[in-house]
Image: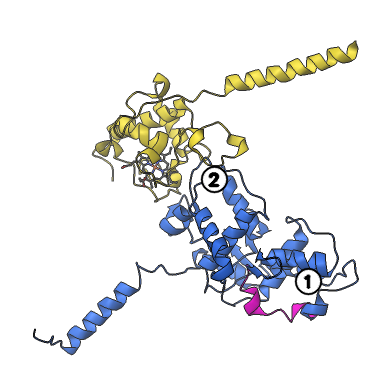
Amino acid sequence: MKPFNLSLFQFLLLFIVCLLLISSPLKAELISGYDFLSNQAKEMQNDDFQNPGYAMIEQGLTTYNRKGENDKLCSQCHGENGDKFIPESIAQFPKFHKILKRPVTLRDQIQLCWGKRLDNFPLLYDDTDLLALETMIRNKAYGEEVNVNISGNMQPYYDAGKKFYLTRFGQMDMNCAQCHDIYTGKMLRGQKLSQGHTNGFPLFRLESQKMVNLPQRLRECFRSLRAETFAQDSDEFRNLEIYLNARGNGLKIETPAIRY
Amino acid sequence: MIFKEKTFTLFSLIMLIFYINNLAAEDIARYEVTGNSIIKPLNDLTGKPERGQELFRDQNKGNCLACHRLSTLNDSFQGNIGPLLDNVTLRLTEAQIRLRIADMKQVNPYSIMPGFYRSPERINRISPLYEGSTILTAQEVEDIVSYLVSLNLKSSGEYK
């Protein structure tokens, strides 16, 4: 067989075609919900005074500085104003808890400290104190890349979350993937469908004019599907949170974000 | 005994409410799927095209514009998840349209389009608020079918 004899031009052409093949349609690029916002909403997110999330962070700090039943303070471990929180570590939630032998979300971890370290009565999962603490703590990892481990102990929970993501629910009979993988970028009425990432939570929703954490947002999805929802601290929503966060591994944390 | 009488009245009232409720809830029509269509109108009902247009646009009913466009309507926000429906009767018969609205998943099991008359038994975790019901009633499905069919007769050839 004769050896190929490519000119430099032909070689470059081939190289570019290969590059194009490797990139776009075969490997979907991660796009933060931020990129689907209007310029005005983007501005709102970036402005500490316009973004209602910062009031929630203030509230979180107040709760953070409140003494527990045993007179202990969060700051005794985590520093003044939470300065000792490690962004890399926050970006890894949900993660496997070695003693409990199950995954815990950042919310679960706050609950554990609240009950065990401060000896407080457990917070309801709907409590604004919990929402405020989560917002304040996750904001400490602002700009850090989401980095959820899905190997080893975490694998079965991740798989269960993925299965849930692909299950159709409610009278509308849809699954998450249909909107957030298949028809991303298409218009649902006046709304461009986003990839449904979680890097902005807890966030301020323009539609309901409210701060919400992820399970609260999921419950709103279930309402629009006309489906029977799950409890905020259910295993189903926890597994889904693992899948969703891991699906956005590499996206930068934007808490507190603005979203539609 | 006064107490007994009161209890009895209350009981009868509750039973009456249950009875009225049951009257209101429509029995879901059985229908036969032939090939990829439903030939007979659901419950043998006749559709009203004007009502069909309202239902087509109504966000709490058909909400078809969430995913579809229709250039004869001037609603400002129309979706583009599904195809433009202007000339749907050039592609599909009335009977085929009926099945697609009633239960698209019997045509394409992976469709995102809700089954507007899909049997509730085939739905996973329906909200208690909607238990035992379909998104549209048989009459409403027929109204929308007749609307799509009428629309095409009127606008054939002249649409943008």
Horizontally, residue A72 falls left or right of residue A250, namely: right
Quadrant into which the C terminus of chain A falls: bottom right
Which labelled disc corresponds to residue A225?
2
Chain corresponding to yellow in the figure: B
Q: Amino acid at mark 1?
A: Leu
Q: For the point 65% across and 55% down, which residue is it? A: A216
Chain for colour blue: A
Front position among marks 2 and 1: 2
Q: Residues within 10 Å of mark 1 (few under 14, many from 20)?
A: many
Residue B124 place in picture, x, y as percent:
53, 42
Q: Quadrant of residue B64?
A: top left
In the displayed orientation, state which residue is furthest to the bottom.
A8
Task: Kindly identify the residue that appears in the image at 66 percent across and 54 percent down.
Answer: A234
Q: Residue at x 58, y 68 (%)?
A: A153
Badge 2, how many Cα within 10 Å: few under 14, some, many 20+?
A: many
Which residues make up the magenta segment?
A: A80-94
Task: Provide the chain ID for the residue under circle 2.
Answer: A
As measured in the structure, the alpha-carbon distance from the residue carrying label 2 to the one carrying label 1 is 36 Å
